[in-house]
Image (tube, rainbow, N blue to C red):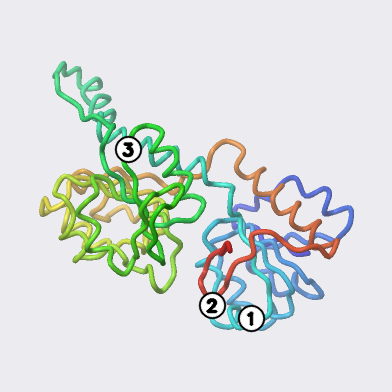
């Protein structure tokens, strides 16, 4: 098995059980072609790398690729999608951490914790009123496990929650009502807070664009913890600077790191975080253990878990 590490050279931990039964080769992107010689499986620890596409067709001899991320958009390209290679991902690892991050982002907006900190630093004693969370409405775009964990947590706090997914339905156990992403512009005006956590696919690229922002409440907050291109960033900037929406908490961006001269850094109502919403203490160890569990199943000839539908770009559950 080959493990593609990132440029920082950090290796995943917890693979001792796998090393007892299979040869593990640790390589960087430059060494991937040589590292793939005779390999049947690849652990894509550097989950944003495009090295698999860059080394194609050498990588086409693989049987299985595991990605240390929930999103696999950086990996999927036409040749891989058409190939018989099985792709699995880190589904389940980031559900609760991201849900807690979303809750924190909403409460920060409602209670103005960042403003309180600023006033403390400036020694300004300035009373203000805050907003109540109970009864406010949240539309979660993406009904996979991260979206569901977020819905359950927000409901427990007192928010009203609905979902947006590929297929509309009623009586969903976590969302209640799920609307179709094809009619997002007709649903968006209901929400006080809009959470983008959908996988990035051709269908969700710039799903939040000018028409959607124009239909939002002027008091709405947008939170993106999915992938940067889910949002048309120019349209978002126009909506924020034009006062058509109130705020945005952005953890992911079209280009990462966010360039120092990008206007989102200082856009009104924006909180920028460096793609950390799912990264709680110990997350790398969890990813290593998850791969090891799946690798032992693969070595035993048992079915893998978290198998991605490569044409849809995410794990489907029947």
Apparent side of residue 317 relative to residue 167 in the rendered image (left or right):
right
Please give the residue where the numbered disc 3 appears in the rendered image. Answer: 159
User: Which image quadrant is residue 87 in?
Assistant: bottom right
Front residue of 53/156: it is 156
Q: In the current view of this chain or complex, which residue is farthest to the front?
A: 171
Question: In the displayed structure, would residue 110 be above or below residue 308?
Answer: above
User: Secondary structure beneath disc 3?
Assistant: loop
Residue furthest right as drawn: 20
- On-image quarter of the N terminus: bottom right
Of residue 292 and residue 19, the one placed in the foreground of this image is 292
Q: First in sequence: mark 2 or mark 1?
A: 1
Residue position marked by numbered label 2 in the rendering = 77
Spot occupied by residue 29 in the image (x, y as percentages of width and height):
63, 67
Query: In front: 34, or 132?
Result: 132
Q: CA distance from mark 3 to mark 2?
A: 39 Å
Give the residue displayed 60% in from the left and 52% down from the top. Answer: 8
**Residue wearing tag 1:** 56
Is mark 3 in CB contact (under 8 Å) with mark 1?
Answer: no
- The quadrant of the image that shows the C terminus is bottom right
Residue at screen point 23% across, 54% down: 263
The CA span between labels 2 and 1 is 10 Å
Q: Earlier in the sequence, mark 3 or mark 2?
A: 2
User: How crowded is the residue under tag 1: few (<14 C-alpha within 10 Å), some, or many (20+)?
Assistant: few
Of labels 3 and 1, the one closer to you: 3
Question: Are the residues at dot 2 and dot 1 in contact (C-beta closer than 8 Å)?
Answer: yes
Q: Residues within 10 Å of mark 3 (few under 14, many from 20)?
A: many
318 shown above or below 129: below
Tag shown at residue 174:
none
Q: Is residue 49 left or right of residue 250?
A: right
């Amino acid at each position: 098995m080959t493990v593609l590490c990132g440029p920082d050279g950090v290796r995943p931990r917890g693979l001792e059980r796998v090393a007892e039964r299979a040869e593990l080769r640790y390589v960087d992107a430059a060494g991937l072609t040589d590292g793939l010689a005779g390999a049947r499986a690849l652990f894509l620890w550097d989950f944003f790398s495009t090295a698999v596409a860059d080394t194609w067709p050498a990588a086409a001899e693989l049987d299985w690729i595991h990605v240390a991320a929930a999103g696999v958009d950086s990996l999927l390209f036409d040749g891989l999608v058409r190939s018989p290679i099985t792709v699995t991902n880190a589904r389940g690892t980031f559900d609760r951490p991201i849900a807690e991050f979303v809750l924190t982002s909403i409460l920060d907006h409602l209670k103005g914790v960042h403003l309180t900190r600023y006033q403390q630093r400036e020694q300004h004693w300035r009373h203000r009123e805050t907003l109540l969370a109970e009864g406010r409405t949240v539309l979660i775009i993406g009904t996979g496990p991260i979206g569901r964990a977020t819905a359950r947590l927000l409901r427990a706090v007192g928010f009203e929650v609905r979902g947006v997914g590929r297929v509309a339905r009623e009586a969903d156990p976590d969302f209640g009502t799920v609307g179709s992403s094809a009619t997002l512009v007709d649903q968006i005006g209901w929400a006080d807070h809009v959470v983008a956590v959908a996988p990035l696919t051709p269908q969700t690229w710039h799903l939040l664009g000018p028409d959607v922002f124009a239909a939002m409440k002027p008091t709405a907050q947008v939170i993106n913890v999915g992938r940067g291109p889910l949002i048309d960033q120019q349209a978002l900037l126009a909506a924020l600077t034009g006062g058509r929406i109130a705020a945005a908490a952005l953890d992911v961006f079209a280009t990462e790191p966010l360039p120092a001269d990008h206007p989102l850094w200082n856009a009104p109502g924006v909180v920028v975080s460096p793609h950390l919403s799912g990264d709680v203490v110990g997350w790398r160890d969890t990813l290593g253990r998850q791969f090891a569990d799946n690798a032992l199943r693969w070595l035993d000839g048992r079915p893998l878990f978290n198998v991605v539908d490569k044409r849809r770009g995410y794990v489907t559950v029947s």
